[in-house]
């Protein structure tokens, strides 16, 4: 059975001396339409797989739902509608139809690009008050474990990964996608559907950079520590500082930069100056 996350094809591989014909695998990118009942509310470019988690996570991190019990049914994709997930909410859930006017459109690269201002992108919430702390030794173990679990990345080299770890460092979920924000929504959606939220004693690890939108999604899920292999953006750092989150970047080997929330990281004997 074909893997829906990548496709194979012939390419010309260029070396210093010659052109070679070779088989290569590409990460699949297709649109997913998220519907409330029959009403489309979002289209995101994603890698197929864990689509119901993605849809549930998206509704949660956009504050349309507050818990898994707000969902009456979730259906799709299926053969007839391979790129549509439809969610019906329970009658008690209040949702202002006017919010549909901005019609979420997300891309695989930058998330919800229709949100043009900081005020529009913020979701009203409180700073995180979790007293959870993590030792450096635990943080240093995460990148290698993340890379070891990135099955499709090994095939294509073209996917982002997000992973959720509990306070002991146990890996709970890892999800891959061409969109880093989609990978986070899939992880949050998986936790939501298993009634694990709030995630106030957990760590989110992402394979690329830490963007504002990733931090916003972690904030809504109440994740106190976010770690990234690469750099954060300035807005990501601002959000982390404002909402009492710990943000770690350039987590590679036994080095990292702590941009916010230093008090949650236990030094493990590393000398402080």
Image (cartoon, grey):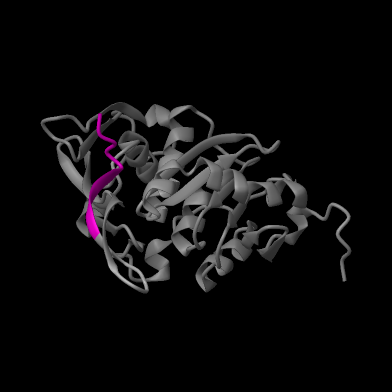
Where residue 32 sits, quadrant-wise, is top left
Taking the image as drawn, is residue 42 in sight?
no
Residue visible at 50% across and 63% down? 209
Residue visible at 33% across and 65% down? 115
Looking at the rendering, the stretch of residues picked out in magenta corresponds to: 1-11
User: In the depicted view, which residue is nearer to us: 153 or 222?
Assistant: 153
Q: Is residue 244 above or below residue 191?
A: below
Q: Position of residue 238 (x, y in %)?
A: 57, 69
Outermost residue to the front: 17
Q: Position of residue 116 (x, y in %)?
A: 33, 70
Outermost residue to the left: 80
Q: Quadrant of the N terminus?
A: top left
Taking the image as drawn, is residue 22 in sight?
yes
Residue visible at 70% across and 52% down? 140
**5 within the magenta span:** yes
Taking the image as shown, residue 217 lies to the left or right of residue 132, namely left
Taking the image as shown, residue 66 lies to the left or right of residue 128, namely left
User: In the depicted view, which residue is nearer to us: 46 or 226?
Assistant: 46
Where residue 190 sits, quadrant-wise, is top left
How many marks the image carries: the answer is 0
Residue visible at 16% across and 42% down? 39
User: In the depicted view, which residue is nearer to us: 130 or 14?
Assistant: 14
Q: Position of residue 195 (x, y in %)?
A: 50, 28
Taking the image as shown, residue 12 lies to the left or right of residue 259, namely left
Q: Is residue 234 above or below residue 60?
A: below
Q: Position of residue 121 (x, y in %)?
A: 40, 62
**2 within the magenta span:** yes
Q: Quadrant of the C terminus?
A: bottom right
């Amino acid at each position: 059975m074909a893997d829906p996350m990548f496709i194979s094809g012939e390419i010309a591989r260029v070396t210093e001396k010659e052109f070679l014909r070779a088989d290569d695998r590409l990460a699949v990118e297709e649109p997913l339409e998220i519907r409330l009942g029959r009403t489309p509310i979002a289209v995101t470019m994603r890698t197929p797989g864990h689509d119901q988690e993605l849809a549930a996570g998206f509704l949660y991190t956009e504050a349309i739902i507050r818990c898994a019990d707000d969902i009456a049914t979730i259906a799709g994709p299926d053969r007839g509608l391979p790129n549509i997930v439809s969610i019906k909410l329970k009658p008690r859930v209040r949702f202002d139809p006017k919010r549909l006017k901005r019609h979420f459109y997300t891309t695989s690269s930058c998330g919800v690009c229709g949100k043009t201002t900081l005020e529009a992108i913020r979701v009203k919430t409180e700073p995180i008050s979790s007293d959870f702390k993590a030792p450096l030794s635990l943080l240093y173990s995460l990148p290698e474990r993340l890379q070891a679990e990135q099955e499709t990345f090994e095939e294509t080299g073209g996917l982002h990964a997000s992973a959720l770890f509990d306070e002991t460092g146990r890996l709970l979920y890892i999800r891959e996608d061409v969109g880093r924000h989609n990978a986070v929504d899939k992880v949050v959606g998986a936790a939501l559907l298993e009634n694990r939220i709030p995630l106030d004693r957990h760590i989110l690890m992402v394979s690329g950079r830490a963007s504002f939108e990733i931090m916003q999604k972690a904030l809504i899920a109440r994740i106190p520590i976010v770690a990234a292999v690469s750099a954060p953006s300035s807005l990501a750092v601002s959000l982390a500082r404002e909402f009492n989150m710990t943000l770690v970047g350039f987590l590679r080997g036994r080095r990292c930069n702590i941009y916010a929330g230093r008090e949650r990281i236990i030094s493990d004997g590393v000398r402080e100056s």
